[in-house]
Amino acid sequence: MKAVLLGGSGFIGTHVAAALKAAGYSVWNCDPRPPRQPADLDGHLSADAVHADAAQLEELLGGQPVVYHLAWRWLPAESNRYMAPSIEHNVVGALRVLEACVKAGTRRFVYFSSGGTIYGPAQGLPIAETHPTEPLNAHAISKLMVEKYVALFGRLYGLDYVTLRPGNPFGPYQNPNGGQGVIAAFLARAAAGQPLEVWGDGETVRDFFYVGDLARAAVLAAETERSRTIYNIGSGQGRTLLNIIAAIEGMLGRKLEVRWRPGRATDVPANVLDVRKAHQDLGWMPQVSFEDGLQLTWESLSDPDSAVRGEYE
């Protein structure tokens, strides 16, 4: 079994690679960045995942692998400043990959969308996959555009695909300075004795869950008999930023200083995902509690390698 990860050197990709390797897959990474865990890979193409030479990409896709598309440029907070480049890089790049997958006879295409952003303001909680999609930023619009193209390739060319819509995963290897991943940022600041920065009043609700559970869902997405469908992946529970701060303070046994910032127009008030479809079809449910995931993430600040590798062995 062969798996190709487009964008496998990032936070989520590193965990997906480790989970796939533990499940018996031969794992190949296509990413301009060096892999964080080379031992979990059988090969690494040092090229931009979505602008790779067509011949190189088609060669990489030989052997009818499962292809995971995680490659993305620009975060939600900055995406509105780079709308045209995002279309050119992310959307057009994904189209090139889809064309190569059809030509190579890819066994399955697993696309990582964004359950945390594409729905927009919630009409009710939790949010099911059938909820209207009214995204509030260019990042989410581009994610949704690629979803639609993936489905189109399924209809036109018979592409076998599964789309995952994750909530807010957290865990080892998340960049605390990357502008995305509030738990990683909070923990890093707490470790450095710096004040936490909170945008808004701290009452924003999100679906935080441990990244290892997302990696398990990624493996199940490759192996399920279900095809051409979409799954929310999250905890199914909402937590405010104030809840997160209280949990970190409880874990560390000390109070933390907070620096308050103005709220942002691109942040929806609440996002909690309905994950019953993934449970029914994939047999998937989150297994790592929020508190255990928080402890694992804290421990990874001093030893990130063991926190990732040991989890899937």
Image: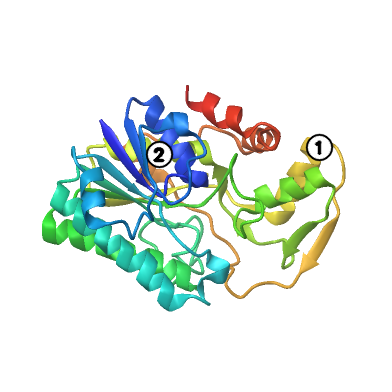
For marks 2 and 1 on the same chain, the one whose residue lies earlier in the sequence: 2
**Residue 50 position within the rendered picture, expressed as x and y whole percent measured from the top left:** 34, 58
Residue 121: numbered disc: none
- Residue at screen point 77% across, 36% down: 251
Q: Is residue 242 above or below residue 279?
A: below
- Residue at screen point 16% across, 53% down: 102
Distance from Cα at disc 2 to Cα at disc 1: 30 Å
Residue type of the residue flagged with mark 2 = Ala
Residue under pointer 1: 252
Mark 2 neighbour density, 10 Å: few (under 14) some (14–19) many (20 or more): many
Residue under pointer 2: 217
- Residue at screen point 41% across, 49% down: 31
* Colour scheme shown: rainbow
Q: What element does badge 2 sit on?
A: helix
Viewer-proximal residue among 293 and 69: 69
Q: What element does badge 1 sit on?
A: helix
- Residue at screen point 52% across, 41% down: 211
**Residue 153 position within the rendered picture, expressed as x and y whole percent measured from the top left:** 19, 60
Q: Is residue 92 above or below residue 160?
A: below
**Res 89 quadrant in image:** bottom left
Question: Horizontally, is 271 left or right of 301 in the view?
Answer: left
Mark 1 neighbour density, 10 Å: few (under 14) some (14–19) many (20 or more): some
**Residue 144 appears in the picture as rendered:** no
**Residue 254 position within the rendered picture, expressed as x and y whole percent measured from the top left:** 87, 41
Viewer-proximal residue among 99 and 298: 99
